[in-house]
């Protein structure tokens, strides 16, 4: 099983600032990496797939990068609605497809 | 916009079978996507359970495969999950999802999610 490790566990950021979250895979997943946002009491929402392609309706302030084992998602200027938990998920060819443990982005 | 809605018992006894159904609206389940289940616990986080195509082709998480059945009912535009011999470790919020196939080997990410339903395993 491919283990996904996210860092940091919690990121404290002021509104308007830039935030970069990291995700590391225990072995290469090529660009088969998605990012999700989850707010309290809600289901996760797809933000990024293919490591860098924004899903439909996702604002341009969200950008993804990386390939192989190292990935990032950057929120260029945090809005109030962006404070949430973010998860990465690998969907490489070997089962199971796995998620990271999440990074909580909180208001500083 | 695709909508998914989970339904089923919120409480299941240990050793029994957990059964959930996901009703899909505003989209035909036969229109070319996989459909699946993901669960979430405070301890293990998000865990992909399995996915199914309209034809009945399935992908299962190997750790659950021996206890898992996912089926599809195209006439009702819904799909279902059955997990047998449950224990407290199966207590989780269960989400149904639409899965997009990203590679020729069938690997998937999830673009639409239901609201989730809490299932507690307890006597």
Image (cartoon, coloured by chain):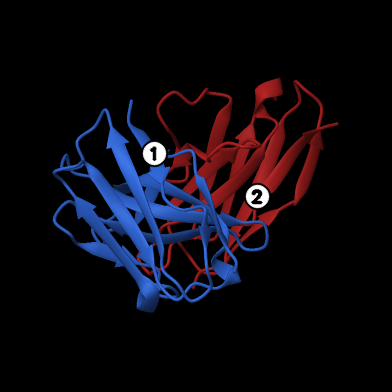
Q: Position of residue A100 (x, y in %)?
A: 59, 57
Position of the N terminus of chain B by quadrant: top left
Q: Foreground: A99 or B91? A: B91
Q: Secondary structure at mark 2?
A: strand
Report if residue B78 is visible in the image: yes
Q: Foreground: A14 or B61? A: B61
Residue designated by label 2: A22
Q: Indicate the quadrant where residue B75 lies.
A: top left
Q: Position of residue A9 (x, y in %)?
A: 75, 52
Q: Position of residue A1 (x, y in %)?
A: 49, 73
Of the chain colours in the picture, the one used for chain B is: blue
Q: Foreground: B111 or A19? A: B111
Q: Residue at x 24, y 59 (%)?
A: B71
Q: Residue at x 86, y 31 (%)?
A: A108
Residue A52 position (above or below residue A58): below
Report if residue A79 is visible in the image: no
Give left or right: position of A102 versus B108. right
Give left or right: position of B27 versus B82. left
Chain letter of the residue carrying label 1: B
Q: Position of residue B109 (x, y in %)?
A: 39, 49
Residue designated by label 1: B5
Position of the C terminus of chain B by quadrant: bottom right
| CA neighbours of label 2 inside 10 A, class few (<14), some (14 to 19), many (20+) | many
Of the chain colours in the picture, the one used for chain A is: red
Q: Residue furthest front?
A: B123
């Amino acid at each position: 099983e491919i283990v996904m490790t996210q860092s940091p566990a919690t990121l404290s950021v002021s509104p308007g600032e830039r935030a970069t979250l990291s995700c590391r895979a225990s072995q290469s997943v090529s660009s088969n990496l998605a990012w999700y946002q989850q707010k309290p009491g809600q289901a996760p929402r797809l933000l990024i797939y293919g490591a860098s392609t924004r899903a439909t309706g996702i604002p341009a302030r969200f950008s993804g990068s990386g390939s192989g084992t190292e990935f990032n998602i950057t929120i260029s200027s945090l809005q109030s609605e962006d404070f949430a938990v973010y998860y990465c998920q690998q969907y490489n060819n070997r089962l199971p497809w796995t998620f990271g443990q999440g990074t909580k982005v909180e208001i500083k | 916009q695709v909508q998914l809605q989970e339904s089923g018992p919120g409480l299941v006894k240990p050793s029994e079978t957990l059964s959930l159904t996901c009703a899909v609206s505003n989209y035909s389940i036969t229109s070319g996507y996989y459909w699946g289940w993901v669960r979430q616990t405070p301890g293990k986080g998000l865990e992909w359970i399995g996915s199914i195509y309209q034809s009945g082709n399935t992908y299962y998480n190997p750790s659950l495969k021996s206890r898992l059945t996912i089926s599809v009912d195209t006439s009702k535009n819904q799909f279902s999950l059955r997990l047998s011999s449950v224990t407290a470790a199966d207590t989780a919020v269960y989400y149904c999802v639409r899965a997009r196939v990203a590679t020729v080997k069938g690997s998937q990410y999830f673009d639409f999610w239901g609201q989730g339903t809490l299932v507690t395993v307890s006597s």
